[in-house]
Image (cartoon, helix red, strand yellow):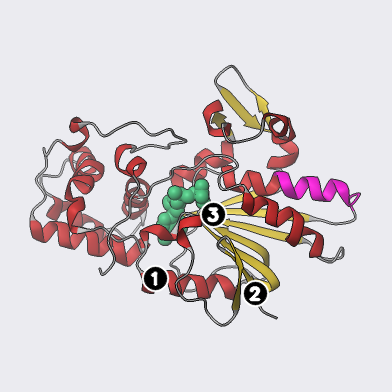
C-alpha cells in the first residue's frame, strides 16, 4: 500500500454514476453508523488493493465508511469484520462484484480529453492497412462514453473508406452496474457537454429534453464486457490497434500501474497505441513502448 489514494473530489462525493459537474461532499454521506475499526480498515483496503489495484490512503477512512457502511447494513451485518468474513466465504463472486461497484469511481463524459481522439483519427486510423479489421479497446470504460466516442470516430473513418474496411470497439470495466448502464446507451444530456454541438448528431439522438441515446449504427460497433484489468490473462486471441485506458490507473500504485501497462502493451499490434489519461503519463516507459506525447504511447515493432 505504498501510493496515496488519488480519488478525485467527484469520486468522494458521488456514490452513483456521475457525468459531472460534481456535487460537493455532504456530511450525511459519512455518518458513522457502522464504526470502522483500525484493523477492519486495514483488512478492507488490503482486500480492495489485492482485487482491484485501487489504493486507499490512511486519510480515506470516511470514504470507505460512506461507500460500504450501507452495504454492511443492507446485508444485516453489525460490523465491517462480519462483512469482510462474508466476502472471504463468498464463492459466487457476487459480493465482490457489489464491492467493486461501490468502491470504483465511474465518473466520465463524452469527448473527454479530445486531443486523444484527434490523434486516433489523424494518425492511427489512416495507418491501418485496409485489409485489417480495426480493433479498439476502451479499458476501464465506466458507463461507456469513451467507447462510444471511439465508435463514432471509427464509424466516420469506415464511412470515408467506403466500407472497404471493418472495425469494432470493446468496452470493459470491473463494475457490472457501470457496464449494464453502458449497454443501454442512454445518457443525461450533460454527459455530452464537451461535445461540439455539430458533432452531437453524429452519434447521439434526443430521447427527451433530458436524455440522449446512442444511435444504433454507433452502438452496433461496440461490445461491452465486465472485466478486471488485474486478471493474469486477458481473454483475447487478437491484438488491438488502440487501447484507451484513461483515468483508470490514477487509483493504482506504481507497481500495479507498470504491470498493467506492460500487460496492455502485449495486446497491442506493432504501431498500435496505448492512450492513458493526461495526468497519468508514465514516469518510465517500458522498452516495448515509445512515447508519442500527450500520454500516447505506440508499440514498437
Ligand atoms: C474514472 S473512470 C474512467 C472512465 C473513462 N476511461 C474516462 O476516462 O472517462 C475509471 C474506471 O476504471 C474502472 N476500474 C478501476 N479499477 C479497475 C480494474 N481493476 N479493472 C477494470 N476496471 C477498473 C472503474 O470501475 C471506473 O469505471
Task: Using a 10 Å C-alpha cutoff, classify the residue at mark 1 as few (fewer than 14 neighbours), some (14 to 19) or many (20 or more).
Answer: some
Circles 1 and 3, Cβ within 8 Å, touching? The answer is no
Label 1 or label 3, whichever lies nearer to me, is 1
User: Residue 118: horizontal and vertical position, in percent?
Assistant: 69, 51
Q: Is residue 243 magenta?
A: no
**79 or 125, nearer to the observer:** 125
Q: Earlier in the sequence, mark 1 or mark 3?
A: 3
> Position of 144 compared to 13: left or right?
right
Q: Is mark 3 within 8 Å of ligand 1?
A: yes
Circles 1 and 2, Cβ within 8 Å, touching? The answer is no
Q: Earlier in the sequence, mark 2 or mark 3?
A: 3
Give the secondary structure at mark 3: strand
Residue marked by disc 3 = 172
The residue range painted magenta reads 152-163
Identify the residue shown where x is 38% and y is 34%. 22
Question: Gap between marks 1 and 3, in whole Å?
Answer: 18 Å
Q: Is mark 2 within 8 Å of ligand 1?
A: no
Identify the residue shown where x is 47% and y is 76%. 284
Work out whether 56 lies above or below 73: below
User: Residue 241: horizontal and vertical position, in percent?
Assistant: 70, 65
- The numbered mark at residue 299 is 2
Give the secondary structure at mark 2: strand
Asked if residue 51 can be seen in this view, the reply is yes
Identify the residue shown where x is 47% and y is 43%. 178
Task: Using a 10 Å C-alpha cutoff, classify the residue at mark 2 as few (fewer than 14 neighbours), some (14 to 19) or many (20 or more).
Answer: many
Q: Earlier in the sequence, mark 1 or mark 2?
A: 1
User: Residue 7: horizontal and vertical position, in percent?
Assistant: 33, 50
Asked if residue 175 can be seen in this view, the reply is no
Kindly indicate the quadrant of the structure image that contains residue 248. Answer: bottom left
Question: Gap between marks 1 and 2, in whole Å?
Answer: 20 Å
Residue marked by disc 1 = 256
Amino acid at each position: 500500500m505504498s501510493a496515496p489514494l488519488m480519488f478525485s473530489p467527484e469520486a468522494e462525493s458521488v456514490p452513483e454514476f456521475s457525468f459531472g459537474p460534481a456535487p460537493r461532499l455532504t456530511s450525511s454521506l459519512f455518518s458513522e453508523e457502522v464504526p470502522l475499526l483500525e484493523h477492519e480498515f486495514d483488512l478492507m483496503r488490503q482486500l480492495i488493493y489485492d482485487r482491484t489495484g485501487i489504493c486507499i490512503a490512511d486519510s480515506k477512512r470516511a470514504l470507505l465508511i460512506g461507500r460500504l457502511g450501507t452495504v454492511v447494513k443492507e446485508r444485516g451485518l453489525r460490523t465491517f469484520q462480519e462483512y469482510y468474513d462474508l466476502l472471504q466465504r463468498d464463492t459466487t463472486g457476487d459480493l465482490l462484484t457489489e464491492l467493486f461497484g461501490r468502491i470504483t469511481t465511474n465518473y466520465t463524459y463524452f469527448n473527454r480529453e479530445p486531443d486523444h481522439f484527434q490523434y486516433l483519427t489523424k494518425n492511427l486510423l489512416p495507418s491501418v492497412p485496409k485489409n485489417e479489421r480495426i480493433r479498439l479497446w476502451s479499458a476501464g470504460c465506466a458507463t461507456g462514453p469513451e467507447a462510444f466516442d471511439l465508435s463514432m470516430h471509427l464509424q466516420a473513418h469506415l464511412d470515408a473508406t467506403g466500407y472497404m474496411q471493418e472495425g469494432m470497439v470493446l468496452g470493459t470495466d470491473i463494475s457490472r452496474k457501470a457496464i449494464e448502464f453502458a449497454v443501454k446507451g442512454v445518457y443525461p444530456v450533460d454527459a455530452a457537454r464537451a461535445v461540439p454541438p455539430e458533432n452531437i448528431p453524429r452519434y447521439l439522438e434526443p430521447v427527451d429534453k433530458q436524455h440522449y441515446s446512442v444511435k444504433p449504427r454507433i452502438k452496433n460497433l461496440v461490445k461491452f464486457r465486465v472485466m478486471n484489468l488485474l486478471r493474469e490473462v486477458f481473454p483475447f486471441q487478437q491484438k488491438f490497434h488502440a487501447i484507451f485506458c484513461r483515468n483508470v490507473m490514477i487509483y493504482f500504485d506504481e507497481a500495479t500501474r507498470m504491470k498493467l501497462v506492460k500487460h496492455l502493451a502485449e495486446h497491442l499490434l506493432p504501431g498500435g497505441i496505448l492512450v492513458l489519461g493526461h495526468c497519468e503519463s508514465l514516469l518510465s516507459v517500458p522498452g516495448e513502448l515509445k512515447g508519442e506525447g500527450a500520454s500516447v504511447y505506440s508499440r514498437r515493432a
